[in-house]
Each structure stands twice: as structure tokens, then as C-alpha cells.
Amino acid sequence: MSFNTGSFVGKLIELNNSQQSIQTLSGWAIHHRRNAQQIVDVWFQQLTKSPKERKLLFMFLSNDIIQNSKRKGNEFTQEFSRVLPDALSHTYKSAVEDLKTIKQIDRILQIWKEREIFGKDFIDKLQSYRPKGLRSESQSEAEQGDGTLMSPTKKRIRSTSDSAPDPDTVIRSLINLERGSALQDSRVKQQFSTIPNEVWNLQAVEKITDRKRLETLLKSVDSSYELLSSHRIRLQTEFQERNKVAAMLKEFVMHQKEQLRSVESRLTEYQGKLQKVQAVRSQLQSHLNSLPDLTTVTKLEPLPEPGSLFGAPDD
């Protein structure tokens, strides 16, 4: 199946923010990597035309294409490096008041830097288009709560106690993982079921002598290759995501065990304090019971006035 600009524009228009949609279009683009220059040019044109709320979606797509195409060649890395400065400048400007979008773009650049997708100088150039006065992703990770930078040693120490993900993050990651799972995609399973048997059988292909039938089969092979390539990329991405979630769960379980030990220690401490308070309470009650009940004492006559005791002597 040959590359068609109009078809690619249509696919970009239909692109949504689901993992499946991004990975499917990424796989399609990688399959047509011989047309990397055209693909990147159309991507950039559509990015500049798209509403500001969809521009981040284009960045997610570029990230997926760049990272997953490197195993097959550097075509997309080279072509995207040609337009990314203008693309980042445009996208950052459109998101100048959208801190969430800015942080997500920061994260993409940080990943490219950590994985050495592009050189440090090039990443620094891209980051220079970021709106001024906001901390970057790397700075945020390296800062304490009071805004001061931590040393690498302090950062490692802090990470052992503060790195555990919160329950909402764990739950959300698990839900997203299962919703976007390639293994559970019934649509893809249905598409696989329609692939002709000849696609898998080289010997059967050699027996076909009719040209028209061979051309039809070639189209089926191209379509099947695109489907399989896209699905393989989805599976690779899901494998990486499941590894991340597994590591997150491991940290979460370790944190819960630490919390369990802490609660157990605190429970023992407060049980001891409760026993002491109960002992004091019992002693106070016993002492109170040993005191006389003043409410039962007979009311005494009032004492006589001093003058009546020392009256004047008789004449």
C-alpha cells in the first residue's frame, strides 16, 4: 500500500488521545518510513493548523514515531529534528497559560534527553522555547518542597521514602493499561481473522500463476504487514508500560509493608499507653471509693456566737 498525503491528513484528523489510536497511526507512519520527509512535513503543517487543545496530541504522536522507528533506521529522527524547533516554539506559545500541557511537553523532552534520542545541545535548544518563569520537569524533580535544589545524595535519600506512588496513580495506571491493552483488542482480533491463508504460506504463493490474483494477494500482504507492524509496536509499548506498572506496584507494596510495620509499632505503643491510663483510672476510682461520702454526714448545729460564751458577770 503506497503512501498517500490525503490519507495521512485524514488519519491525523481522526487521531484521538487514546494509546491505541496513537500507536496505530505511529505504526502506519513507520511502515511508510521511506516517505519520512513527506510524513513529517504533513505532520508539521497539520500541527500548526490544529486547535491548541490538539497540539499536544501531535507531540505524543511524534514521540511514538521517533522512539519506535529507531530500531529500523534514523529517517524519522533526522526529519523531525528539521522541524521540531519550529514545532516546539509554536506549541509552547499556544500553551503559554496551560501549565499541564507545558509539563507534558517537558516530560517528552526529558525522556528524549534521558534516552539520548537527540543530542543534549539540541534538547537544550528545544527547551529554550519554553515559557520563562516556570520550573522544568528536571528542575521540579530535583527540588525540595521549599524550592531549594537538593544534592544528588539528598535526592536519593528522599526518593527512598517519597517515591511510593499514591493509590490513585496506581489505580489509574492499571485501568489505563487494561483499557488500552493490545491483547484485549477485539477489533484487531477480528482483522487478523480476515487475513487470507496465502499470506502465511510461501509454498501456496509459488503455485499461483494468475497475475491478477497475485496483485490482489500483494495488496493483502501489504495490508497484513501494516496491521502486524502496528500491532507489534502496540505490544512492545504495552510490554514497556506493564514493566513500569509492575515496578510501580512493587514500590507500592514495599511502601505498604513499611506502613504496616509503622502502624504495628504505633499500635503497640498506644496499647501500652492505654493500659497505663486504664491502671491510673482504676487507681483513681479505687481511691475515690475509699474516701467518706460527705453527703451522708449529719448536719451539725451552728456554733454559738462568741458573745454568748463570754457573757457579762452578775452584779
Image (cartoon, rainbow, N blue to C red):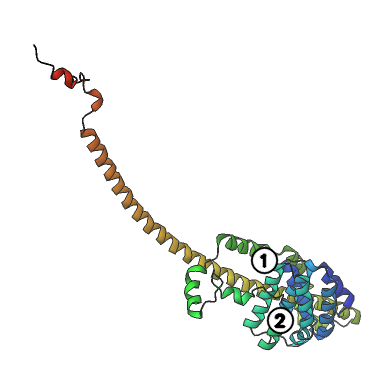
Residue in the picture at 27% in, 44% down: 280
Q: Which residue position is annotated with label 1?
A: 181
Q: Quadrant of the C terminus?
A: top left
Q: Secondary structure at mark 1?
A: loop
Q: Residue furthest right?
A: 212
Asked if the residue at tag 1 contacts the one at tag 2, i.e. Cβ–Cβ closer than 8 Å, the answer is: no
Q: Amino acid at mark 2?
A: Ser
Local packing at callout 2 (Cα closer than 10 Å; few below 14, some 14-19, many 20+) is: few
Vertically, is 33 above or below 20? below
Q: Quadrant of the N terminus?
A: bottom right
Q: Which of the 4 image quarters holds residue 126? A: bottom right
Q: Which of the 4 image quarters holds residue 308? A: top left
Residue in the picture at 24% in, 35% down: 288
Q: Amino acid at mark 1?
A: Ser
The mark found on residue 128 in the picture is 2
Residue in the picture at 12% in, 16% down: 312
How many callouts does the rendering have?
2
Q: x%, y% of residue 253?
A: 49, 64
Q: Secondary structure at mark 2?
A: loop
Work out whether residue 91 or residue 271 is closer to the camera in this orientation and state it: 91
Disc 2/disc 1 C-alpha distance (Å): 36 Å
Q: Earlier in the sequence, mark 2 or mark 1?
A: 2
Q: Image check: 212 left or right of 28?
A: right
